[in-house]
Amino acid sequence: MTAAPSSTAFLNLVVGYDGSPPSSRALDAAALLLHGRPGRIDVLYVVHLSGMVVEAPVAPAEIEPGFDEIEQELRDQAASQLRDSGVSWGWEHRVGGAIAEELTAFAAAVHEADPAKFVTIVVGSSSSAIHRVAGSVAVGLSRHPHVPVLIVP
């Protein structure tokens, strides 16, 4: 179990972001958590490719430009959302892996680079019916947490 950070500890929040309402709520919550304390938000956009897309020989070259455009739109959206928050933040993206695994690996790498940072993953909970059956990123993270996870309703 990880101890709670003191109010002066550097808080590094890794926010899973895809432009959806749950991810927007998570980004808002992260900005509120950092208000008046030392810290940073790393906004992480993960493009999950299905097994069929990953194995297709022409897929990466054909779909990359489309992902670049989507990523830029999402980055602009996050920038607009954080514009008046006054928090330090950065943008990262990953392609290919399962979203929960990519968030966990990124958060672990941030912590390994500077163990003095208190690293927490922040995600929004989905109300989608399919996620109740198949599971969501939030559910996956909560079942096997490697770092603290905050799930925003």
Image (tube, grey):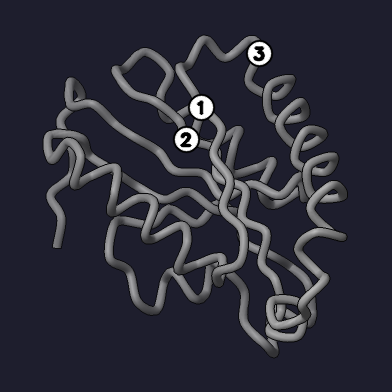
| Mark found first going from the N terminus, 1 or 2 | 2
Q: Which residue is found at the position 45% from the left and 31% from the top?
A: 41
Q: Is residue 75 left or right of residue 103?
A: right
3 or 2: mark nearer the eye: 2
Q: Which residue is found at the position 29% from the left and 18% from the top?
A: 38
Q: Which residue is found at the position 29% from the left and 31% from the top?
A: 11
Q: Which residue is mark 3?
A: 83
Q: Which residue is mark 1?
A: 90
Crowd rating for badge 3 (residues with CA inside 10 Å; few <14, some 14–19, many 20+): few
Q: Is residue 95 above or below residue 79?
A: below
Q: Position of residue 20 (x, y in %)?
A: 77, 50
Amino acid carrying label 2: it is: Asp
Crowd rating for badge 2 (residues with CA inside 10 Å; few <14, some 14–19, many 20+): many
Name the element at disc 2. strand
| Mark found first going from the N terminus, 3 or 2 | 2
Q: Which residue is mark 2?
A: 42
Quadrant of the rendered structure where residue 125 is? bottom right
| Mark found first going from the N terminus, 3 or 1 | 3
- The alpha-carbon separation of the residues under discs 1 and 2 comes to 5 Å
Amino acid carrying label 1: it is: Gly
Please report contact status of discs 1 and 2: CB closer than 8 Å, yes or no: yes
Crowd rating for badge 1 (residues with CA inside 10 Å; few <14, some 14–19, many 20+): some
3 or 1: mark nearer the eye: 1
Residue at the bottom extreme, as displayed: 133
Q: Position of residue 144 (x, y in %)?
A: 35, 76
Amino acid carrying label 3: it is: Arg
Of 108 and 96, the residue lying toward us = 96
Residue 122 numbered tag: none
Quadrant of the rendered structure where residue 134 is? bottom right
Name the element at disc 3. loop
Name the element at disc 1. strand
